[in-house]
């Protein structure tokens, strides 16, 4: 006798950009209050992929290699007496994040979104990738 097929996924659409936005907002809301306050006004944007100009500028050929990006002037580099800077933005890229989620298979989608979000907020605080990886214990 054969086992019945797992039908849990048969009627489930892929998470949309709006679904990702909700998961990112929840991940941010779940951060400690002090961390959220220190982050200030950060705009979150969800796109399927980084645009061609961004990928070219970073020397990335495969758009699946970039799961997130911080764009703005980090907090430590801001001139408090100068004009207001453009809003800081954290981009999360849905398709590369979904790809990582599928490849890993050992963590939930919300956890990966939270990880990418926190990583990019680290850049907002002025940390580079090596510093962020050291904090995460990935060194």
Image: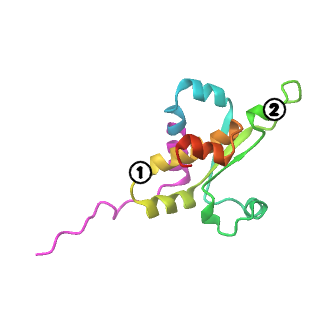
Residue 62 in the image, given as x and y percentages of width and height: 65, 69
What span is colored magenta in the figure? 1-26
**What is the magenta segment's predominant secondary structure?**
loop
Q: What secondary structure is marked by label 2? A: loop
Which residue: 64% across, 60% down? 49
Residue that sits furthest to the right in the current view = 82
Q: What secondary structure is marked by label 1? A: loop
Few, some or many residues within 10 Å of mark 1 (<14, 14–19, 20+): few
Q: Determine the image quadrant of residue 105.
A: bottom left
Report how far apart the C-alphas of labels 2 and 1 lie in the structure. Answer: 35 Å
Task: Determine which residue is flagged by label 2.
Answer: 78
- The disc label shown at residue 108, or none: 1
Which residue: 72% across, 38% down? 126
- The disc label shown at residue 96, or none: none
Instruction: Please tell me which of labels 2 and 1 falls first in the chain.
Output: 2
> Is 72 left or right of 111, judged from the image as shown?
right
Which residue: 41% across, 51% down? 108
């Amino acid at each position: 006798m054969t086992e019945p097929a797992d039908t849990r996924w048969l009627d489930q659409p892929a998470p949309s950009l709006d679904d990702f936005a909700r998961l990112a907002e929840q991940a941010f809301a779940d951060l400690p209050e002090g961390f959220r306050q220190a982050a200030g006004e950060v705009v979150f944007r969800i796109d399927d992929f980084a645009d061609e100009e961004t990928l070219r500028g970073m020397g990335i050929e495969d758009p699946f290699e970039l799961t997130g990006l911080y764009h703005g002037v980090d907090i430590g580099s801001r001139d408090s007496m100068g004009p207001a800077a453009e809003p800081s933005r954290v981009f999360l890229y849905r398709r590369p994040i979904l790809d990582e989620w599928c490849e890993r298979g050992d963590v939930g989608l919300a956890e990966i979104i939270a990880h990418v979000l926190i990583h990019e907020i680290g850049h907002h605080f002025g940390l580079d990738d090596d510093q962020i990886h050291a904090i995460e214990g990935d060194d």
